[in-house]
Image (spheres, helix red, strand yellow):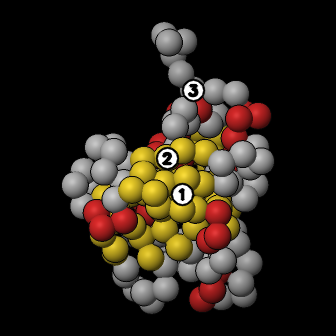
Amino acid sequence: MNPADFDGRRELQAACHCGAVRFRVLLADGLRSARRCNCSYCRMRGAVALSANLDDLHVVEGADKLTLYQFNTGQAKHYFCSVCGIYTFHSRRSNPNQYGVNAACIDGLSPFDFDEVPVSEGRNHPKDGDGKAVVAGWVSYRGNGGG
């Protein structure tokens, strides 16, 4: 991975596992926005999400294949491919002007490319309290050097 390829200045190609859903995205802050969340839903999903402004994500194929999931307050909208089941992106409750994009859907990127990812405290959502985001911890990946 060349981090410069993901600096947010160029549009990236992305897709679900089966390719039924394809989209283009311009990251709001490159790879610096990578994070996970420990809310009841995200801890089961386990994806690394990157930020994109709403106007910077465009579904180019398979919009009819996207399935919506909402829970609790219903403010966040989580979109999945109805064919392969892969989470693609979601509109954020914490920042309604942005999507969280599944890093694994972006061509050439993997969640294992991140040495360390902060985990947002989502069990007690910032919108339910003082509005301040809190880092609950960190997830790290250390490869065994076996390519």
Q: How far separated are the C-alphas under marks 1 and 2?
A: 9 Å
Tell me, yes or no, whether the two marked residues, 2 and 3, touch with CB atoms within 8 Å.
Answer: no
Q: Amino acid at mark 2?
A: Ala
Mark sitting on residue 14:
2
- Residue at image position (45%, 89%) is 73
Mark 1 or 2: in front is 2
Q: Amino acid at mark 1?
A: Val
Q: Amino acid at mark 3?
A: Arg
Furthest-top residue in this view:
146
- Residue at image position (54%, 32%) is 108
Mark 1 Cα shell of 10 Å, populated few (<14), some (14-19), many (≥20)? many
Mark 1 or 3: in front is 1
Mark 2 Cα shell of 10 Å, populated few (<14), some (14-19), many (≥20)? many
Nearest the eye: 27 or 74: 27
Residue 91 at what x, y percent from top left?
Answer: 53, 73
Nearest the eye: 89 or 45: 89
Corner quadrant of residue 139: top right
Residue that badge 3 annotates: 142
Q: How far separated are the C-alphas under marks 1 and 3?
A: 23 Å
- Residue at image position (34%, 74%) is 68
Furthest-left residue in this view:
83
Whether residue 33 can be seen here: no
Residue 51 at what x, y percent from top left?
Answer: 65, 60
- Residue at image position (30%, 67%) is 64
Residue 40 at what x, y percent from top left?
Answer: 40, 69
Q: Secondary structure at mark 3?
A: loop
In the picture, measured across the screen, residue 47 lies left or right of residue 71, that is right
Mark sitting on residue 9:
none
Residue that badge 1 annotates: 101
Mark 2 or 3: in front is 2
In the picture, measured across the screen, residue 123 lies left or right of residue 30, that is left
Residue 98 at what x, y percent from top left?
Answer: 63, 71
